[in-house]
């Protein structure tokens, strides 16, 4: 499928059939997410990969009992940094220098710029910025899943504070942002499966400035 056919095929799957997604497909989806664009390349978020059935059941209880969580093959939790700290920036600069085989001193100006950006915002503002970065990767993940003919559901309907405690995210310096169950649609039990996709008309969506 080309990209437009892929986007026509995907939808926010409401019921999944429990069939397992092959590990190679999951790995390609995760790698696409890892390669997603991110401001300054910082990637201020992590993705938790959850396969444990008992844990998925517990997560369902804090996610408005949405069945896709338990019916999915794999559940991805996108969790953003709860702040952008000097330690985060130090690690990023060191890693960048290593990957690009250059002296870390060559990146001092870049480092100072990042430190200034972080210091100019409150912790909550830094978290909200990090969450928006996570959404860039989240969108790439949805498209990557569709390219693999794997169904996925963009999901915000959950108690973030309860999920954070369940996954011990505060200890990791993270806060949950959104969920992505991966699996295969149960077309016989999903009321949305065979309905036409509805999007705003192009002439109302694309405006000439």
Image (spheres, rainbow, N blue to C red):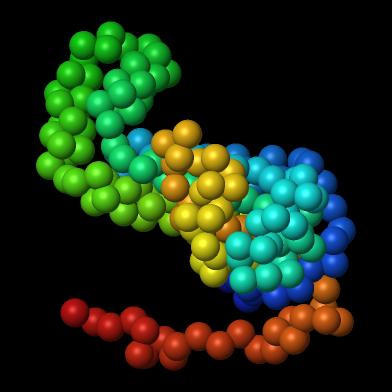
Is residue 1 rendered to the left or right of residue 21? left
Looking at the image, residue 45 lies above or below residue 177? above
Which percent across, then down, holds residue 43?
Answer: 40, 39
Looking at the image, residue 190 lies above or below residue 150? below
Question: Which image quarter holds the C terminus?
Answer: bottom left
Residue 112 appears in the figure: yes
- Pick the residue in front: 207 or 166: 166
- Pick the residue in front: 106 or 85: 85
Which percent across, then down, holds residue 177?
Answer: 46, 55
- Pick the residue in front: 143 or 65: 65
How many numbered marks have been drawn onto this rendered protein structure?
0
Which percent across, then down, holds residue 163?
Answer: 55, 53
Is residue 108 rendered to the left or right of residue 161? left
Q: Residue at x 37, y 84 (%)?
A: 205
Q: Residue at x 48, y 47 (%)?
A: 79
Q: Residue at x 24, y 51 (%)?
A: 125
Looking at the image, residue 170 lies above or below residue 181? above
Residue 143 appears in the figure: no
Q: Residue at x 74, y 57 (%)?
A: 57
Is residue 20 rendered to the left or right of residue 110? right
Specify the quadrant of the image occupied by residue 143: bottom right
Is residue 35 rendered to the left or right of residue 90? right
Question: Which image quarter holds the N terminus?
Answer: bottom right
In the picture as drawn, the residue positioned furthest to the top comes out as 103
Which percent across, then down, holds residue 148?
Answer: 71, 55
Looking at the image, residue 75 lies above or below residue 197? above
């Amino acid at each position: 499928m080309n990209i437009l056919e892929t986007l026509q095929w995907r939808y926010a799957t409401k019921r999944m059939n429990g069939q397992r997604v092959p590990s190679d497909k999951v790995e390609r989806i995760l790698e696409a997410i890892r390669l997603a664009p991110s401001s300054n390349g910082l990637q201020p978020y992590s993705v938790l990969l959850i396969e444990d059935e008992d844990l998925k059941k517990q997560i369902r209880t804090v996610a408005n009992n949405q069945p896709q969580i338990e019916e999915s093959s794999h559940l991805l939790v996108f969790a953003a940094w709860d702040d952008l700290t000097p330690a985060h920036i130090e690690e990023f600069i060191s890693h960048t220098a290593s990957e690009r085989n250059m002296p870390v001193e060559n990146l001092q100006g870049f480092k100072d710029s990042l430190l200034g950006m972080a210091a100019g915002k409150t912790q909550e503002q830094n978290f909200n910025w990090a969450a928006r970065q996570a959404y860039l990767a989240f969108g790439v993940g949805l498209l990557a899943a569709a390219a693999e003919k794997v169904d996925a559901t963009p999901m915000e309907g959950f108690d973030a504070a309860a999920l954070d405690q369940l996954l011990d995210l505060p200890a990791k310096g993270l806060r949950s942002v959104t969920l992505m169950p991966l699996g295969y649609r149960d077309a016989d039990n999903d009321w949305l499966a065979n309905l036409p996709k509805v999007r705003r008309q192009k002439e109302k969506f694309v405006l000439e400035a």
